[in-house]
């Protein structure tokens, strides 16, 4: 589907006929992937690279590249690429759980808030006396309002 777009075809289509070879490559994960090379390429030849002029053109067009193609371009676009994403692993291995691994920084020590000092008996009695006096005063005011 990605190749159905006219602008995609304009970029990847060659003006003259050409041939490519497809190799099955065994990836580190154990799955196989197709890699594209020139017809006469052999594994002992090592990767081939585009011309310096073509690399400059590709770098000028790099605005729409995904991360995998950016890696290829940073490595001067070797063919076949010495690294490859495994599409099977991305389909088969799905995230099913999270597991905490701990703190990134040392765990902060809990802040101990000072426990309030309990008031003395004398201060409590003084406060109670003051509140009782206020209560008596409020009762007197209410009596005056009722009269």
Image (tube, grey):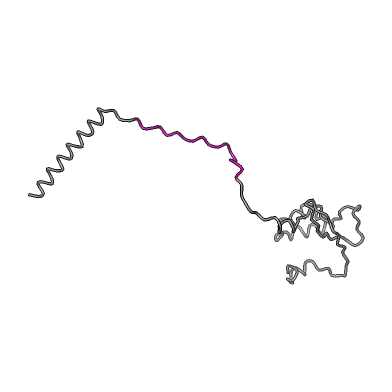
User: Which residues lie in the magenta part?
Assistant: 100-117
The N terminus: image quadrant: bottom right
Q: Give the image quarter of residue 38.
A: bottom right
Instruction: Estimate the x, y position of residue 27 in percent, counting from the top left.
Output: 80, 53
Camera-side residue of 42 and 10: 42
Instruction: Estimate the x, y position of residue 32 in percent, counting from the top left.
Output: 81, 57
Camera-side residue of 100 and 55: 100
Magenta span includes 24? no
Q: Give the image quarter of residue 96.
A: bottom right
Camera-side residue of 79 and 21: 21
Can residue 84 be seen here?
Answer: yes
Camera-side residue of 80 and 61: 80
Residue in the picture at 20% in, 35% down = 130
Residue in the picture at 92% in, 60% down = 40
Q: Which is the main secondary structure of the residues drawn in magenta?
A: loop
Q: Is residue 114 left or right of residue 141?
A: right
Residue in the picture at 11% in, 49% down = 145
Q: Is residue 111 left or right of residue 36?
A: left
Q: Is residue 135 left or right of residue 15?
A: left
Magenta span includes 113? yes
Q: Is residue 15 above or below residue 57?
A: below
């Amino acid at each position: 589907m990605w190749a159905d777009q006219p602008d995609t075809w304009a970029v990847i289509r060659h003006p003259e006929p050409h041939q490519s070879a497809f190799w099955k490559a065994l990836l580190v994960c154990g799955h196989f992937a197709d890699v594209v090379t020139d017809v006469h390429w052999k594994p002992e030849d090592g990767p081939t690279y585009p011309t310096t002029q073509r690399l400059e053109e590709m770098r000028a067009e790099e605005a729409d590249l995904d991360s995998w193609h950016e890696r290829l371009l940073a490595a001067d676009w070797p063919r076949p690429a010495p690294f490859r994403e495994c599409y099977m692993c991305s389909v088969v291995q799905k995230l099913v759980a999270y597991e905490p691994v701990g703190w990134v920084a040392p765990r902060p020590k809990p802040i101990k808030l000072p426990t309030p000092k309990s008031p003395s008996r004398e201060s409590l009695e003084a406060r109670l006396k003051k509140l009782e006096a206020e209560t008596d005063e409020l009762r007197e005011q209410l009596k005056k309002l009722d009269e």
